[in-house]
């Protein structure tokens, strides 16, 4: 680590998010489309925050209200680029927001969400290398360079020329090193250089990469560092969004297995940005994690389960075909079986709900058994109510527990009961009519019906 980083030189980030994103064909702003359950823009904001940046400024344009609402809770400033006049013009809009700031500035893009904190740190470190480059450009080598701007650099990474594809010669277009658009520049250099950028080019726009050549004209060289193409993949369409999602998921699956989880069919498991897995967790095929899930050591998630906002305890078992919604908590060695749904419900240590059950706004004590087809009736059309089931209680199959209601510890609810009043501990409750058998009735009924039919 450089002396500069040890000294805690201030860092600011400018995130460009002014584009209309017309190819997304969406009412939702492009940078707010989610990857792994979190808007792309907030992926970047989290990476910047982990870097310890003092200031983050988002440059908005069309759909600014959506972007402003998304970043306001994070205390992130926004500025407006009223006219789309190019990337240099967009960055320049942040000058007033960073007035008085002296330090390093990272320039990022809201639709390039997978850039890691580590890569941002490498850019800053290179900016303060011994040769003191005027700017650091993040380059990459895609399989198909296409219409990306090119970076012509020497073996030492010193940039000789940067050129947009539209303005490049055939020889320059043959260069495989491309410009991601991401840069690191000292604040005292950035805005001074931006003031000198012109728009005499094929698109008539103010290009951010021009600051590299302007610095070169002053006798100051810039440097390029490289990263993989996946990390700087941009999103301009639904198809590209799916590609970025797949890339993120592939990395996360690999990390999960490296950390000690077993994924039986990795490509079928989908994680959220904040999924936490313990050691020796086993995940069967076709499991989907939404945001806010923590899985403790030794738990097993069976196939086709959907889990969001839930906490799963050690050696607990989930599924197959289970749905855990926000607020679901499973204790140690508890079990949720097939076609069981939980919402704002706690299943105590060793408790079981093995089949065809809904537990909503419910607390189930340790060791309790919830029979197949049991439903906690927690909603009267206007308000929600809680059900409490004590430790060791047994609820028979096809029972309806009409909240608010408490089933005492060790109590037994007979199958088919509709329980509307509290049940004391260790009691048996039966809420069903007595069985009335009529010998021979079915046979006589069939004979009468057959006679009518003939």
Image (cartoon, rainbow, N blue to C red):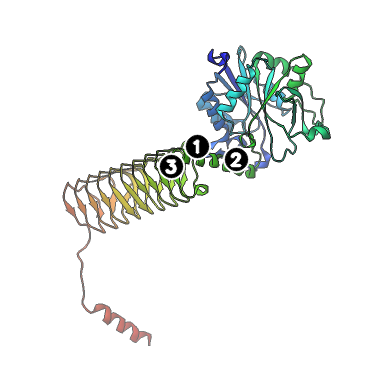
Residue count near mark 3 (Cα–Cα under 10 Å), binned few <14, some 14–19, many ≥20? many
Asked whether, in this view, residue 215 is left or right of residue 314, the answer is right
Residue count near mark 1 (Cα–Cα under 10 Å), binned few <14, some 14–19, many ≥20? many
- The reply to whether discs 3 and 2 touch (Cβ–Cβ < 8 Å) is no
Asked whether, in this view, residue 114 is left or right of residue 372, the answer is right
User: Dot 3 corresponds to which residue?
Assistant: 261
Q: Nearer the viewer, residue 40 or 285?
A: 285
Q: Of callouts 2 and 1, which one flags the residue occurring earlier in the amino acid sequence? A: 2
Mark 3 element type: loop
Mark 2 element type: helix
Q: Which picture quadrant has residue 115? A: top right
Q: Nearer the viewer, residue 428 or 114?
A: 114
Residue at (72% x, 22% y) in the render: 158
Residue at the far bottom in the pictured view: 454
Measured Cα–Cα span from mark 1 to mark 3: 17 Å
Mark 1 element type: loop
Q: Nearer the viewer, residue 358 or 140?
A: 140
User: Dot 2 corresponds to which residue?
Assistant: 244
Q: Nearer the viewer, mark 3 or mark 2?
A: 3
Q: Nearer the viewer, residue 76 or 180?
A: 180
Q: Of callouts 3 and 2, which one flags the residue occurring earlier in the amino acid sequence? A: 2
User: Dot 1 corresponds to which residue?
Assistant: 273
- Marker count (numbered): 3
Residue 47, position in %: x, y?
A: 54, 28
Residue count near mark 2 (Cα–Cα under 10 Å), binned few <14, some 14–19, many ≥20? many
Residue 180, position in %: x, y?
A: 68, 31
Residue 234, position in %: x, y?
A: 65, 36
Measured Cα–Cα span from mark 3 to mark 2: 23 Å
Q: Nearer the viewer, mark 1 or mark 3?
A: 3
Q: Of callouts 1 and 3, which one flags the residue occurring earlier in the amino acid sequence? A: 3
The quadrant of the image that shows the C terminus is bottom left
Residue 75, position in %: x, y?
A: 52, 23
């Amino acid at each position: 680590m450089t002396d500069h980083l040890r000294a805690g030189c201030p860092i600011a980030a400018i995130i460009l998010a002014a584009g209309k994103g017309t190819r997304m064909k969406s009412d939702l702003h492009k940078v707010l489309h989610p990857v792994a359950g979190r808007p792309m823009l907030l992926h970047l904001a989290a990476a910047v925050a982990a870097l310890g940046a003092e200031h983050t400024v988002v440059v908005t344009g069309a759909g600014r209200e959506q972007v402003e609402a998304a970043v306001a809770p994070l205390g992130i400033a926004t500025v407006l680029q009223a006219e789309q006049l190019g990337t240099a013009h967009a960055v320049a809009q942040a000058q007033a927001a960073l007035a008085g700031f002296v330090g390093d500035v990272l320039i990022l893009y809201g639709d390039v969400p997978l850039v890691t904190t580590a890569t941002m740190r490498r850019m800053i470190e290179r900016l303060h290398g011994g040769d003191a480059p005027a700017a650091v450009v993040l380059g990459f080598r895609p399989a198909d360079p296409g219409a990306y701007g090119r970076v012509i650099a020497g073996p030492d990474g010193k940039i000789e020329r940067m050129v947009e594809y539209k303005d490049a010669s055939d020889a320059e277009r043959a260069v495989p090193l491309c410009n991601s658009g991401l840069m690191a520049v000292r604040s005292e250099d950035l805005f001074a250089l931006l003031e000198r950028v012109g728009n005499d080019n094929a698109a008539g726009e103010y290009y951010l990469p021009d600051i590299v050549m302007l610095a070169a004209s002053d006798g100051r060289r810039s440097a390029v560092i490289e990263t993989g193409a996946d990390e700087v993949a941009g999103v301009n369409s639904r198809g590209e969004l799916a590609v970025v999602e797949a890339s993120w998921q592939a990395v996360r699956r690999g990390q999960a297995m490296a950390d000690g989880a077993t994924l039986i069919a990795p490509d079928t498991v989908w994680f959220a940005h904040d999924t936490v897995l313990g050691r020796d967790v086993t995940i069967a095929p076709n499991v989907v994690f939404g945001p806010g899930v923590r899985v403790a050591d030794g738990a097993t998630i069976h196939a086709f389960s959907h889990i969001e906002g839930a906490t799963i305890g050690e050696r607990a078992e989930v599924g197959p075909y289970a749905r855990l919604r926000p607020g679901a908590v499973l204790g140690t060695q508890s079990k949720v079986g097939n076609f069981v749904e939980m919402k704002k419900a706690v299943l105590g240590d060793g408790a079981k709900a093995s089949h065809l059950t809904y537990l909503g706004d419910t607390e189930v004590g340790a060791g309790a058994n919830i029979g197949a087809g049991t439903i906690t009736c927690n909603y009267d059309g206007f308000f929600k109510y809680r059900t409490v089931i004590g430790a060791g209680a047994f609820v028979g199959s096809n029972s309806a527990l009409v909240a608010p209601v408490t089933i005492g510890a060790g109590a037994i609810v007979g199958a088919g009961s509709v329980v509307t009043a509290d049940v004391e501990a260790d009691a048996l409750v039966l809420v069903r009519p007595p069985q009335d058998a009529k010998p021979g009735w079915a046979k006589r009924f069939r004979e009468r019906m057959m006679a009518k039919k003939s």
